[in-house]
Amino acid sequence: MTTVAPPKLSAAAARRIALAAQGFGRPRPATPPGTRQIRELVTRLGVLQLDSVNVFSRAHYMPVFSRLGPYDRALLDRLSGHDTPRPTRRLVEYWAHEASLIPVQSHPLFRWRMSDVDAEAWGSIRRVIREHPELVADTLALVVEQGPIRASATGIPRPKRQPGDMWNWHDGKIALEYLFYTGQVVAAGRVNFERLYDLPERVLPPEIVAMPTPDPTEAQRELVRIAAAALGVATEPDLGDYFRLPRADSKARVAELAAAGELVEVDVAGWGAPAYLWPAARRPRRIEARALLSPFDPVVWFRQRAERLFGFRYRIEIYVPAPKRVHGYYVLPFLLGDALVARVDLKSDRQNGSLLVQSAFAEHDVDHAHVAAELAAELRLTAAWLGLDDVVVRGRGDLAPALQRAVRS
């Protein structure tokens, strides 16, 4: 039997396909985007990762801005349930990539994860039901009676933070997170980024609550389809990472979709691993993009893929001790055309109304003056969107001098 070699793609073509699939390559709207455009974008991406760090901007707001430009963040809040009647809710939280906003119709696709908490969840979530089942039952009863509630409503004080603690959760919060992980409660919204917990039937649209639970393998296949459409062209680890599928399941689901012709195996020059093309992916000849990317943007969140696509080695240094940081605390890659050309450490100085550029570094073989001019324009646009009046560039980094001149001009 003759084996047919997979079609070949150049690395540049794969990069353009990937960016187009992520919503780049088309001009931003000439006027601020409305709810429909935001909803369509989030549906295309399939997920917006949440993160508690707010030194610059909440992570989930940035991917929309990066692709659509300045928009009213209250529109995204309303889509995710803030002051929104239940039947019109479009987004809901769950552990999809990490903690994430997902379209409500995707929520049932994670019921396999909800039912497999022992294999999927982390230690404290698994332990609470074994060691304190009465606490979990009492917490659920509290949600039934009083929901939506904050974790503080459980009445359990927060323990003293220990060195190395990331979240410092008390037992009541852990019980709520167990219920959230298993789907017995959902996030009704957030207040000052703190989750409000309530029953699914009081938050989700009735048709979502009543939807039959999908077969786990079919649910995972659908998640791989969503990931493949959002990535355009990807390796199996790229596809599995998008919704954090167990590796054995990711391999199986990708193989099944490839065998069925829903994914097309391709050979991307320089990737060194089999890749899979989403058949409906756009294949643009050119990408004209200009955007700052959150560290939690799908374009860069899987660091191996970012290096494979762009030759861009990226590490988030939030948890690195300050003296050991190379580029800064909250560093955003800068996308120009189809390349990542720089990285900037940004901070919103809300008290003084300034967007601070703590450091600015150029990638190899880029025109500093050109990159600085484009980056300065994007920083001004970003500052205005965040309600900040000024851009202040500090002197750290090889791109900082050119960026200071560009901002002044």
Image (cartoon, grey):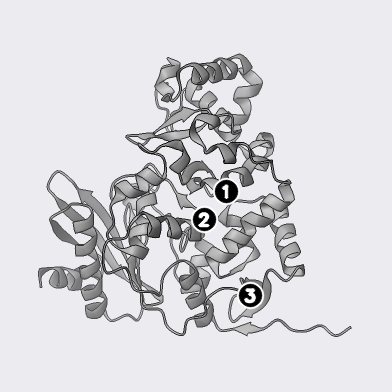
One can see residue 218 in this view: yes
Q: Identify which residue is drawn at 48% across, 42% down.
A: 92
Callout 1–callout 2 Cβ contact below 8 Å: yes
| Residue 272: numbered disc | 3
The residue labelled by disc 2 is 46
Say whether disc 2 or disc 3 marks the residue closer to the N-terminus. Answer: 2
Work out how far the residue at label 1 is from the one at label 2, CA to CA, in angstroms: 8 Å
Q: Name the kind of residue labelled 1 in the image.
A: Ser
The kind of secondary structure element at disc 3 is loop
The residue labelled by disc 1 is 106
Q: Name the kind of residue labelled 2 in the image.
A: Gly
Q: Where is the C terminus found, in terms of image quarters?
A: bottom left
Q: Is residue 124 left or right of residue 165?
A: right
Closer to us: 362 or 24: 24
Compared to residue 21, the image places residue 55 above or below, namely: above
Say whether disc 1 or disc 3 marks the residue closer to the N-terminus. Answer: 1
